[in-house]
C-alpha cells in the first residue's frame, strides 16, 4: 500500500500483518454556532480478530463519536474529521468513496445502538426490517430473505420467531427489541460488531441476558467486538482490553485485569474508587472533584489536571504523551508509574 | 383541626411514615364517548411498609414494578385506589386544604432527570425560592433571599449562582439545585426517585455523598427509589424489593444483600455486574428467562412464578404473603424461601 512507507507498522491488506481495525491519531471537531468543540483529539486504538475491546468513558468523552467515525455515520456538518486514519484490513476507510464505505458497512463492520426503539423503524414489521438488509445487500429473494430473517431471530433467541416476523417494534419488550437490532446487525455476517451502550436502557436481569447473548454470538461467529460503555461492571465481565477516554483522548489503555488491579491514570483510579460496590458495604465513596471539561475550552496541558489529585506544574504546561508501561499498557499521565504503584502499595 | 394537640416527639428510629395495603390501579378504557373500563394496570397492588425517622429505605425493582407510582402516591400526586398512609400519625389521603399543605411541607421529592425537572425560564434563586411562595409561613418575606443562599451553600453551590439559569449548570449541579429546592421547607421526609441514575459515574458519587451528609446534619428520612442495586446498598439502611406492584422482600441492608430468601432478589443481585474482572468466572449468576409480565394481567398466585425456577403447583394457586420465613426472620413473599448457597469464596 502506498501509505505504508510513512507508517511505523507495515500495513498489509490482510489482518495477519497489522490489526483488523485500527484507528490512528483521529481528530474530530464539531463546528457549531457557539464555537468549535474539539471532540476527538488524537485517538488511536486497534482491534484484532476475535477480541473484545471496551471503550470506557463518561458522556462527552468522545467514545461514541469515534465509533460513528469508524462506521462513517457522523453528521457532517457539524462534525469535521480533521485528520487521522481508520484502517480496516489495511485500507484507510477515510480515503474511500461513499460507495466503497457502504460495502464495508454492515458486511464487514456493523453497529448496534443504545436505544432500540428509536433505532428501529416503527412503521414496518421487524421481519421486514431484517430481511430488507438481506434483499438489498445480499441480493436475496423475498422468500429466502424471510427464511434467513427467521434464522437470525432464532439465533438471537427470540421465542416463536416465525410468528413474530409480522410484529412491529412497539410490540416487543425492551430486551427483545435489542435482540431484533442485534439480528439486523448480524444479517450480513460482519467481522466487527460495534456495540454502543447496548444495555444501558435495560434492567439488570435483561442486561445480563443481552450481555450473555453478545458473548455467545461473538464466540460462535468469531467476531471482534468494540463495546462502548460507561459501566465499569459490564466491562469487567466481558472485555479483553480497555481504552479509557477523557475529553476526546485515550488516557489509559490496558488489559482488563491489570487496569482494575492497578490503574495507571488518576482518572481511571478515581472512577474505580467512586463506584459503590455490591459486594462491599460501608466503603467510603471517594469522588473526582469538579466537572468534565467544556470541549470548546479544553484545559491546557493534561486535560484532566484541574480535577487531578496528583497535579503538578508540569501537568498544566505540558500535554502528556502515552507512557508505555509494558505488557502493551499505556497511560497518558506524567506520573503514570507513581499512580500505578500507589495502588499496588 | 387547626394545629396538632402536642408536637410529636422526634425520636430517631420510630416510624414517621406508615404505609398500609396501598393499591393503585390505572383503568384501561375502550371507546371514545362512552369509555368502558376493560381492565386495569395494577401498578401498585398492596404495598405496606414503615419508614423510620432518620433512616434511608431503598425501594428497588425493574422498570414497571411500580416504584415510581408508589413515589407519586406518597407525594399525593395520585390518589390511591385503596389503602392508607400516615405521616406522623396523620392520614395522608384524607387531608384537605391547610392540613394537606402542612403535610406536603413535611414531605418533598427529588426527581430523576435534572434536565427536565427545573423550569428553564426561572433563575436558580426563583426555583429554590418558589416553595416559599406556596408556603409563605416557612420563611418571612425579608429573609427569603438569605435562606435561598443558605440552601445553595448547603448543597455545595456558590451563593452567587442565585441569578443564573439551569442551562448554565451541569447535570450534577442541577441535581444539587433540585435537592436544595426539596430542602427549602425543612421537610423531614424526602422521596428520591432515581436521584443519581441520570448522572455520570464521577458525578454520581458526589451527589450520593451530599445526600448522606445532609441526612446526618438535618436528620432527614429518605425513601430512595433506584434500580442500581450497588448504589442502594451503599446508601440504604433497609431495602424493599418490588416486583409487579408488590414488595416481595423487605429487610435490612444486610438481610437483603447477604441473606436474601426470595428467588427474585437472589436473581436480581446475581445479575449485577461486579466491577472486578477477577470475579467474572466464579460469579454464580442466576439467569432469569423471559421478561416481566404485564401489570395489566399479572400471573395468578405468586407473580414471580412465571420466571421462577422453584415454581410448583402451589405457586400458581396461592399468593404468598410477605411475612417472616423459617429460613430467615425478615419478610419474604415466597412459599419456598431459603437462603442461597454461599457463592464460592473470593
Image: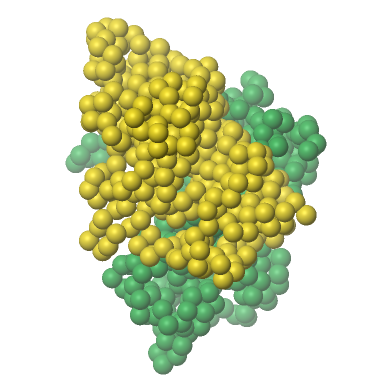
Chain colours: A yellow, B green
Q: How many labels does the image show?
A: 0
Q: Which residue is drawn at 61% across and 28% down?
A: B287
Is residue B218 in sight in this rendering? yes
Percent position of residue B30, x then y: 27, 35
The residue that appears at 70% across and 37% down in the rendered structure is B278
Q: Is residue A31 left or right of residue A233?
A: left
Foreground pick, A47 / B101: A47
Question: Is B95 drawn above or below residue B273 in the view shown?
Answer: below
Give the farthest residue toward the left.
Answer: B33
Q: Is residue B99 above or below residue B148?
A: above
> Which residue is painted at 58% across and 28% down in the image?
B288
Q: From the viewer's perspective, tell me whether residue B258 is left or right of residue A288.
A: right
**Left or right of residue B28: residue A275:** right
**Picture residue at 74% right of the left edge, 47% below the top:** B255
> Percent x, y for residue A206?
52, 33
Give residue B318's position: percent from left, percent from top.
62, 29
The percent position of residue B168, horizontal first and vertical second, equals: 36, 69
Q: Is residue A207 above or below residue A29?
A: above
Task: Establish if B241 lies above or below B17.
Answer: above
| Residue B91 in view | no
Residue farthest to the front, as pictured = A5
Quarter holding residue B340: top right
Quarter of the image with the C terminus of chain B is: top right
Depth check, front residue: A297 or A75: A297
Towards the viewer: A329 or B259: A329
Asked whether A21 or B59 is in front, the reply is A21
Amino acid at each position: 500500500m502506498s501509505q505504508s512507507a510513512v507508517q511505523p507498522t507495515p500495513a498489509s491488506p490482510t489482518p495477519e500483518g497489522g490489526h483488523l481495525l485500527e484507528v490512528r491519531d483521529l481528530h474530530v471537531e464539531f463546528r457549531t454556532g457557539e464555537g468549535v468543540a474539539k471532540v476527538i483529539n488524537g485517538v488511536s486504538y486497534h482491534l484484532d480478530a476475535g477480541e473484545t475491546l471496551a471503550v470506557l468513558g463518561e458522556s462527552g468523552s468522545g467514545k461514541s463519536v469515534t465509533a460513528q467515525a469508524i462506521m462513517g455515520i457522523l453528521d457532517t456538518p457539524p462534525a469535521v474529521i480533521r485528520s487521522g486514519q481508520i484502517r480496516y484490513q489495511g485500507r484507510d476507510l477515510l480515503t474511500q468513496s461513499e460507495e466503497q464505505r457502504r460495502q464495508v458497512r454492515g458486511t464487514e463492520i456493523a453497529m448496534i445502538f443504545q436505544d432500540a426503539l428509536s433505532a428501529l423503524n416503527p412503521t414496518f414489521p421487524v421481519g421486514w426490517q431484517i430481511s430488507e438488509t438481506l434483499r438489498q445487500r445480499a441480493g436475496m429473494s423475498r422468500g429466502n430473505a424471510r427464511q434467513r430473517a427467521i434464522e437470525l431471530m432464532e439465533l438471537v433467541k427470540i421465542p416463536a420467531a416465525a410468528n413474530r416476523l409480522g410484529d412491529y417494534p412497539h410490540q416487543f419488550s425492551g430486551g427483545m427489541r435489542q435482540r431484533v437490532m442485534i439480528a439486523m446487525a448480524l444479517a450480513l455476517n460482519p467481522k466487527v460488531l460495534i456495540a454502543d451502550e447496548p444495555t444501558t436502557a435495560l434492567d439488570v436481569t435483561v442486561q445480563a441476558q443481552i450481555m450473555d447473548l453478545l458473548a455467545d454470538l461473538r464466540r460462535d461467529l468469531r467476531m471482534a467486538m468494540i463495546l462502548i460503555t460507561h459501566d465499569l461492571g459490564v466491562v469487567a465481565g466481558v472485555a479483553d482490553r480497555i481504552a479509557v477516554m477523557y475529553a476526546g483522548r485515550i488516557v489509559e489503555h490496558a488489559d482488563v485485569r491489570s487496569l482494575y488491579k492497578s490503574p495507571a491514570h488518576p482518572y481511571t483510579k478515581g472512577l474505580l474508587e467512586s463506584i459503590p460496590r455490591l459486594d462491599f458495604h460501608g466503603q467510603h465513596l471517594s469522588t473526582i472533584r469538579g466537572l468534565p471539561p467544556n470541549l470548546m475550552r479544553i484545559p491546557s496541558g493534561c486535560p484532566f489536571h484541574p480535577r487531578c489529585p496528583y497535579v503538578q506544574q508540569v501537568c498544566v504546561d505540558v500535554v502528556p504523551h502515552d507512557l508505555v508501561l509494558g505488557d502493551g499498557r499505556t497511560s497518558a499521565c506524567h506520573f503514570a508509574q507513581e499512580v500505578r504503584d500507589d495502588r499496588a502499595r | 383541626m387547626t394545629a396538632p394537640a402536642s408536637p410529636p416527639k422526634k425520636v430517631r428510629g420510630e416510624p414517621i411514615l406508615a404505609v398500609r395495603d396501598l393499591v393503585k390501579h390505572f383503568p384501561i378504557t375502550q371507546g371514545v364517548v362512552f369509555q368502558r373500563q376493560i381492565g386495569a394496570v395494577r401498578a401498585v397492588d398492596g404495598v405496606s411498609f414503615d419508614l423510620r425517622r432518620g433512616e434511608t429505605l431503598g425501594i428497588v425493582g425493574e422498570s414497571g414494578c411500580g416504584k415510581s407510582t408508589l413515589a407519586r402516591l406518597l407525594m399525593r400526586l395520585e390518589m390511591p385506589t385503596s389503602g392508607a398512609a400516615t405521616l406522623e400519625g396523620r392520614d395522608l389521603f384524607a387531608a384537605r386544604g391547610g392540613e394537606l399543605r402542612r403535610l406536603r411541607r413535611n414531605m418533598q421529592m427529588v426527581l430523576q432527570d435534572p434536565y427536565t425537572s427545573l423550569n428553564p425560564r426561572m433563575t436558580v434563586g426563583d426555583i429554590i425560592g418558589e416553595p416559599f411562595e406556596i408556603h409563605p409561613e416557612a420563611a418571612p418575606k425579608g429573609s427569603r433571599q438569605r435562606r435561598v443562599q443558605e440552601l445553595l451553600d448547603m448543597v455545595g453551590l456558590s451563593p452567587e449562582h442565585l441569578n443564573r439559569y439551569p442551562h448554565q449548570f451541569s447535570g450534577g449541579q442541577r441535581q444539587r439545585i433540585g435537592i436544595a429546592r426539596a430542602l427549602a421547607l425543612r421537610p423531614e421526609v424526602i422521596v428520591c426517585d432515581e436521584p443519581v441514575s441520570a448522572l455520570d459515574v464521577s458525578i454520581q458519587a458526589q451527589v450520593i455523598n451530599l445526600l448522606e451528609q445532609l441526612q446526618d446534619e438535618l436528620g432527614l428520612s429518605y425513601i430512595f427509589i433506584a434500580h442500581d442495586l450497588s448504589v442502594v446498598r451503599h446508601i440504604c439502611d433497609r431495602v424493599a424489593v418490588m416486583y409487579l406492584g408488590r414488595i416481595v422482600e423487605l429487610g435490612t441492608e444486610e438481610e437483603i444483600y447477604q441473606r436474601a430468601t426470595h428467588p427474585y432478589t437472589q436473581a436480581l443481585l446475581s445479575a449485577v455486574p461486579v466491577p472486578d474482572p477477577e470475579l467474572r468466572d466464579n460469579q454464580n449468576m442466576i439467569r432469569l428467562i423471559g421478561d416481566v409480565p404485564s401489570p395489566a394481567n399479572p400471573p395468578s398466585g405468586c407473580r414471580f412464578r412465571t420466571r421462577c425456577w422453584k415454581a410448583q403447583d402451589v405457586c400458581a394457586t396461592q399468593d404468598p404473603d410477605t411475612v417472616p420465613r423459617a429460613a430467615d426472620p425478615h419478610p419474604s413473599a415466597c412459599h419456598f424461601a431459603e437462603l442461597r448457597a454461599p457463592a464460592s469464596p473470593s
